Image: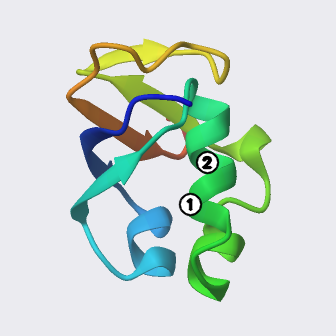
Amino acid sequence: EGDVMKLDIRYFAWLRERVGTASEQVETEAGTVAELIAELRTRDEGYAYAFSDTGSIRAAIDQDLVEMDAPLAGAREVAFFPPMTGG
């Protein structure tokens, strides 16, 4: 069994609108960013909608941009936001 850890999760732009909060603390046993997303998706329709297309989401652990398979061990904060596009 994985260790339960507390993470501060922050949501930006339309992700924040869809999940309905800018930040929250969650307890999770997820090992990677992708596993965390899979867990969040099951919460309710807003989360499912926000994370329906992970190709349009970027993640940062403690303010460092990471890939979806990045390990969460030692993380304090995970932020999710849309790709920063010019235009």
Which image quadrant is residue 54 in?
top right
User: Where does label 2 land, which residue?
Assistant: 37
Q: How is the image coloured?
A: rainbow
Residue nearest the observer in this picture, 28 or 14: 28
Question: Residue 44 at what x, y percent from top left?
Answer: 60, 84
Tag 2: Cα neighbours inside 10 Å, few (<14), some, or many (≥20)? some
Q: Is residue 83 visible?
A: no
Q: Quadrant of the C terminus?
A: top right
Residue nearest the observer in this picture, 50 or 74: 74
Q: Is residue 87 visible?
A: yes
Which image quadrant is residue 51 in?
bottom right
Q: CA distance from mark 1 to mark 2?
A: 5 Å
Disc number placed over residue 40 in the picture, else none: 1
Q: Is residue 22 left or right of residue 43?
A: left
Q: Amino acid at mark 1?
A: Leu
Q: Residue at x 24, y 33 (%)?
A: 77
